Image: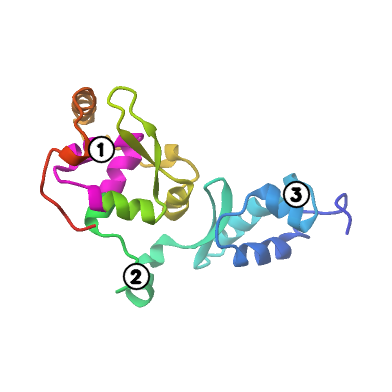
Amino acid sequence: MSSAEASARSVAGAVEALLLLAEEPMAAIDLAQAVGVPEPVVTECLVDLAGFYDRTGRGFELRRVGGGWRYYTREVYADLISEHVLEGRESRLSAAALETLAVIAYSQPISRARVSAVRGVNVDGVIKTLLARGLIVESGHDHESGAVVFATTRYFLERMGLDELDDLPPLAPHLPEVEDLEAELSQLARSEVPAGSDPSDRQERP
């Protein structure tokens, strides 16, 4: 079939096969090149497939995340999967790591000392864990203190099922005094201390 004759329906099977084998989100342009059809045809196919899975109540869904497309199990089955597939796995992040990751996600780019100030504990070990997992990355230096700052990665978006950082749920309903927090963080940035002198010496396990 030539690219001129291709339709979203005609390439659906090939697109599904490629996505089933993908270990990370695949961009529409990459899928189009692999199938040998124009990108708009593949984009239409992806949208149609996502809608079809939703309408038919499949146990999985097709999401656009991190600039690409990937299959995910539906949220309604999260407890079932957690109990029978993920329970006891060493790869789970601790509560401390998740809290630290949340601070970085909503305040990035942010330094180690500022994260420690928000959490009230030394986060050196947790930062190392998040870096090793590829969820955060060093993203330059603070223009005032010179401290290394951290930001989330594309892999973070993929694991969270998000397409971009703007898709993060708003903090306002959970932090009514978020403006006060921002003011406090700004003040901390002006008087930041080196990573070895975090505001709290209390360590926690990553």
The answer to whether the residues at label 2 and label 1 have Cβ atoms under 8 Å apart is no
Q: Earlier in the sequence, mark 2 or mark 1?
A: 2
- Closer to the observer: label 2 or label 1? 2
Q: Position of residue 79 (x, y in %)?
A: 33, 68
The answer to whether residue 170 is visible is no
Q: How is the image coloured?
A: rainbow
The answer to whether the residues at label 2 and label 3 have Cβ atoms under 8 Å apart is no
Is 135 placed above or below 184 here?
Answer: below
Q: Amino acid at mark 2?
A: Ser
The residue at which mark 1 appears reads as 173
Q: Residue at x 50, y 45 (%)?
A: 163
Q: Earlier in the sequence, mark 2 or mark 3?
A: 3
Label 3 sits on a secondary structure element that is helix
Q: Residue at x 17, y 46 (%)?
A: 122
Q: Earlier in the sequence, mark 3 or mark 1?
A: 3
Q: Position of residue 186 (x, y in %)?
A: 24, 24
Q: Residues within 10 Å of mark 3 (few under 14, many from 20)?
A: some
Label 2 sits on a secondary structure element that is helix
Q: Which residues are magenta?
A: 100-125
Gap in angstroms between the C-alphas marked 2 and 1: 27 Å
Quadrant of the image containing the C terminus: bottom left
Q: Position of residue 60 (x, y in %)?
A: 51, 65
The residue at which mark 2 appears reads as 82
Q: Amino acid at mark 3?
A: Val
Q: Position of residue 182 (x, y in %)?
A: 24, 27
Is 178 placed above or below 50 here?
Answer: above
Question: Of residues 25 and 153, which is closer to you in this image?
Answer: 153
Gap in angstroms between the C-alphas marked 2 and 3: 36 Å
Residue 56: assigned label: none
Is 10 placed above or below 112 here?
Answer: below
Residue 41: assigned label: 3
